[in-house]
Amino acid sequence: MLATSRHLRAPLLIVSCLLVQRSAARDTNEGADSWNAAAREELTAALRVRWNEGQARNVVLFVGDGMGPSTVTAARIYRAKEEGRLAFEHFPHVGLLKTYNADRQVPDSASTATALFSGVKGNYKTGGVDQSVQMDDCEASLRPEARLKNMLHWAIEAGKDTGFVTTTRVTHATPSALYAHHANRNWECEQRMPASASRCKDIARQLVEDEPGRSIKVIMGGGRQCLNTNLTLGPSDPLDTWSCRRQDGRELVSAWRQDKEARGLRHAVLANTRDLRQMDVDDTDYVLGIFANGHLMYDFERDKSPDGMPSLKEMTSVAIKVLSKNEKGFFLMVEGGMIDMAHHRGYASRALNETAAMSDAVQEVLDWVRLMDRTDTLVIVTSDHAHALSINGYPARGNDILGVGGRSKADGVPFTTLTYATGDLHAYNYSVGPNGTVVRPDPSTVDTTSFHYHQQAAITSDEAHHAGVDVAVYATGPMAHLFHSLHEQNYVAHVMAYAARLGPYAPSSGARGLPQAGTVLVATVVCALVTFRL
């Protein structure tokens, strides 16, 4: 079946590309024949899709932090107009994920990452632990039975190489759920840990000192201020005031290097784009790339010289080259983390630009799959949660997605196509007018497409908050067809493990046997009948 899928993959990709090229060339005067022809081409491509039921040698999971459905739609228009697609929107298999936590309707990133990676949902702001651990309960997080294994553990146990790449701090919520077990995502370093958590290690120490962190082959992102006590500060690499700063005298980057030297492992510590580009991939097995004190700069503002910070695409490319040397395969998690940061601050333009940058990183992996004929690679793109970004106002087709979308019939003031439900004082931006009326600023008087423009928000708060809506999951490669419906978020880990025969689905796991296609079909039909009767 895998061999057949290899032959069918290329025509499918070609048809998909033709669809985009044709649609991008259309203007707004299409007739019925044009729409019908495009639909027939899309139907032809759909009919050519075949399930790849082979075993996944490699698994690449992209997490667009905060990349909900409205973000994907807006980023698509931002990058490729209404008719276009982002790289992952070509994938043949798509589903939806329910993102609620074990204890919250609207989730945070650490708990949702735990569900994605381990297959078990946890509580708000906890990571790598099950729902028996409440936020801030250090003692509960130390119980072995509460500590979860995930795709990273399972891949290492199977002899595969592992890594993660992020545009946030390497100790931030999403990556921390891969290697740490904690009762509060804010415990990135010791500075913000209360006395009640004295028996717990901070997240940075778990990454460098404990397993599986010590066995991760590729680690790239920011977060030097959580790893090192002594820092060099400057305008191009400021402190992240939203995070802690290590003050206990530890220099964990040096500790990481010393550990690799003591074990005789080929390694490299990277600090900028030059280091990344000059690294000898063939002579390096372990990589620690820490490119910023806090998060990496937004893609639009980062220093693109060799002395600056690398792009997500470039980090992903190097990670693939390092990990693919292992004949047993690899697991890689790539996070577009600054999508979420931009949304929290109310900068829709930055969020869309970061989503487009992640799409470029996805395309880099797809190009590698195609070039190396690695159809045994499962690639998944999803999000941990959405943001309360809306697209509204009936703007004309072709209108700038960051522009003005309409005019309020209540006060006559224009509004932008993109708005937030919540935001900080910069985004709220209302004032009291004559006779106590509320006055909203006119966005048509400023440049709403600027990376520095705050979208208006309906409710003022400390920042723009997460949304609790479902998010999409896109997949291609072995067992990608298992994403086909509305799923619980923790289902993703089970699909990855099943596709690669890892962890609970490994032949040596002692499980009662792997589900077979026919069994799954019968079970699905039975469940549907039961649900219908209920």
Image (tube, rainbow, N blue to C red):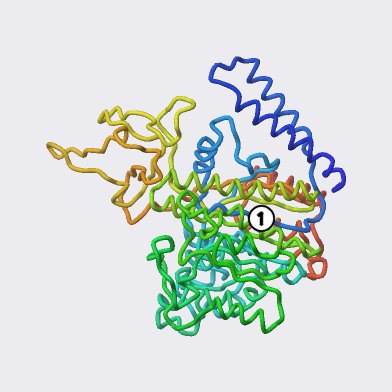
Residue 533 visible from this viewpoint: no
Residue 328 falls in image quadrant: bottom right
Number of marks drawn: 1
- Around disc 1, counting alpha carbons within 10 Å, would you say few (fewer than 14), some (14 to 19), or many (20 or more)? some
Answer above or below: position of 247 versus 37: below
Q: Position of residue 48 (x, y in %)?
A: 79, 34
SS state under label 1: helix
Q: Position of residue 278 (x, y in %)?
A: 64, 62
Residue 388 falls left or right of residue 171: left
Examine the rendered structure and indicate whether residue 229 appears above or below residue 362.
below
- In front: 10, or 315? 315
Q: Is residue 444 visible?
A: yes
Residue beneath the point at 60% across and 55% down: 489
Residue at the spot 39% in from the left edge and 41% down from the top edge: 450
Q: Nearer the viewer, residue 465 or 401?
A: 401
**Label 1 is placed on what type of residue?**
Ser
Q: Residue at x 43, y 50 (%)?
A: 343
Return the x and y of residue 484 as percentages of the image width and height: 68, 44
Q: Which residue is mark 1?
A: 317
- Up-down relation of residue 255 to residue 527 (above or below): below
Residue found at the far left of this picture: 435
Residue 235 location (% of width, % of height):
39, 61
Residue 397 vs 78, above or below: the answer is: above
